[in-house]
Image: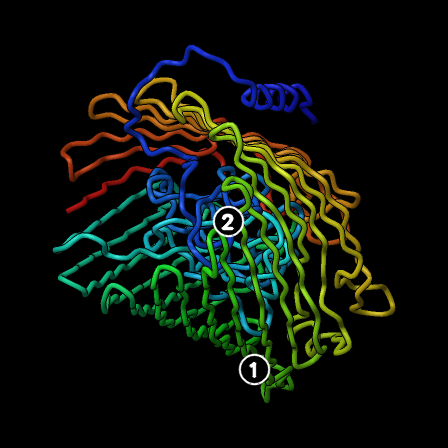
Amino acid sequence: MKKPGIYLIAISFLIQLFIPVAGMAQASFNIADTIKIEEVVVTGTPVKVNRNSVPMAVSVIDRAQIEETDESALLPVLNGKVPGLFVTERGITGFGVATGSAGQISIRGVGGSPTTGVLMLIDGHPQFMGIMGHPLPDSYVASDAERVEVIRGPASILYGSNAMGGVINIITKKQENDGLHGNARLSYGSFNTQKYMGSLGYKKDKFSVFVSGNHDNTNGHRDNSDFKINNGYVKLGWDINSHFNLSTDFSLAAFEAADPGPDTLKASPGERIDITRGYWSSTFLNDFGKASGALKVFYNFGEHNITDGFHSKDHNYGLNFYESLQLFKGNNVTLGVDYMNYGGIAENLLAMNGNGIVFADTSVVETGVYGFVQQSLFENFILNAGLRYQNHSVYGDQWIPAAGFAWQFFGSATWKGNVSKGFRSPTIRELFLWGPNPKLSPESIISYETGFSNSFFERKLNAEITFFSVKGDNLIITVPMEGLRNAGEINNKGIEFLVNIQPVNNLKLEATYSYVNMEEPVYATPEHHLYFSANYKWKKLQFMGSVQHIGNLDSDASSVVSNENYTLLKAKAVYNITRNLKLYLSGENLTNEKYAVNRYYTMPGTTVFSGLNIVF
């Protein structure tokens, strides 16, 4: 059932935030701000810049916001906090892969099923399965992230393929303080759900190390919906001198999950999966003030086993190099090159009476060269423009342009505009497996966006509004009797709002709203997405709550349209026993709403968790 009143109230309230008013109490806020107007970001441009200087819409989720949740997986933290972004779920924890899986990501209606139109990055290097082309949501854990930067809109100019709808860049933790520091957390909740996390960091002089481990286990809220995962992470850093820094990290995740199957009458459960994912990377940074850059090398790998006989081993390795130069005042020119080789072997070990069959054993190579220019005019007006040349070993080459501006006026007010092209190369699955088409061209879209942001009352009230339009006509779809073809179209328009406010020194309020008008329904993209949260601190107690409303969500990945509408209520109470020891109690779906993000995969009703967090 539609609720237009809710949307009109939200829109009216948020628009009023751009009209100057007076009389708000002046106070020092002691809970981390959600929007940091002068925040430095590294995802929207090749170099670190003020967030207001980036013409793209960029959202930042910092460490404090991550720790407010009970999530061990990182992607659910973003739902609601980042306007225009939606992540599907199917149970109390765990996403899975293959049939019945969740973890599909949509930004402004671009993403796909599986997700190949939104690019996951870890410290700037790409993360996706080498054969299928999608990220693995279960392998991204909250304990390893210092913050998350999200580009809402195409970013192929900088990151190449898959950054068609946007980019989610996980910035990993680095031990900053000297000495030994640690953190441990354990929790227990509904359906025998157990979560354990431990991390240690050590720094002495120019050397640092950070290690972490996670274990999650649940029986699941349905029969045959159990899930368990083990994650490990290590990061080493060396500040060679004032100009050079070297870091290397390694991550490994192993998880098992079951597909409970649809919850329809006489339906049978699906398959079980056993997945191992890992990566290694190394980054060499240089910074001489007027010249700075990086060389990054990475190697991603994985092995997938499914009880129907499917087995795969895949890889995704490469390098990124860029160097930025300040040629004169207000100018920054960046030249970059990236190389990526991805692929692997996919087979069924049970086919052909147990003799097995190999579907594909191949890889493709992508190489990109790009230039990016930023020029400040009159100090407060910044122009950005760039061009990328991309070569693919199967379909050939293409050019990717982008241009935009950011104008800061009246002190803290900012107006941005951006036009950019995003693209996605066809995956190995689409080119060579299961009804393939080796003549497929890359998908591409053109995005237009403009937005305004402002802050008031010494930045105790911050607000943003963004308008966007996304168009494309060569998406890869299955055409009846013809198979895979570049015949799909997309035409989405929408609005995104974000506001936070601190009326008193120990209270934080946050709201986001996104509206996506889709010419054709898009799976995993709600037409309306409204989110509100409150965080109140009193002496040793802290109370947090949120309300999230989803309107007109297409929950069926097939051509059938199935709209879902639901509202979720969460709450959490934290008691600080000492400065280093906390107890918490939380509840999700407190109104016991019945809903499904994936059609026929009903989500849990009310769930309760309690836990302990230790910091030293």
Instruction: Please tell me which residue lies in front, 397 or 500.
Output: 397
- State the residue position of label 2: 150
Q: Can residue 446 be seen in this view?
A: yes
Residue bearing mark 1: 345
**Where residue 306 is drawn, which disc sits there?**
none
Give the class, few, some or many, for how many residues have Cα within 10 Å of label 1's Cα (few <14, many ≥20): some
Q: In this view, does 350 lie to the left or right of 332?
A: right
Vertical position of residue 21 compared to residue 611: above or below: above
Q: Where is residue 289 in the image (x, y as percent from the top left)?
A: 35, 59
Q: Residue 282 in the image: x percent, y percent?
A: 36, 72
Location of residue 484 (image quadrant) = bottom right
> Are the residues flagged by discs 1 and 2 in contact, CB closer than 8 Å?
no
Residue at x 26% of width, y 67% of height? 236
Q: Alpha-carbon neighbours of circle 2 within 10 Å: few (<14), some, or many (≥20)?
A: many
Disc with the residue nearer the chain's start (1 vs 2): 2
Position of 289 relative to 263 (above/below): below
Left or right of residue 257, residue 404 in this image: right
Residue drawn at (38%, 65%) of the image = 253
* Percent coordinates x, y for residue 10 in the rendering: 59, 23
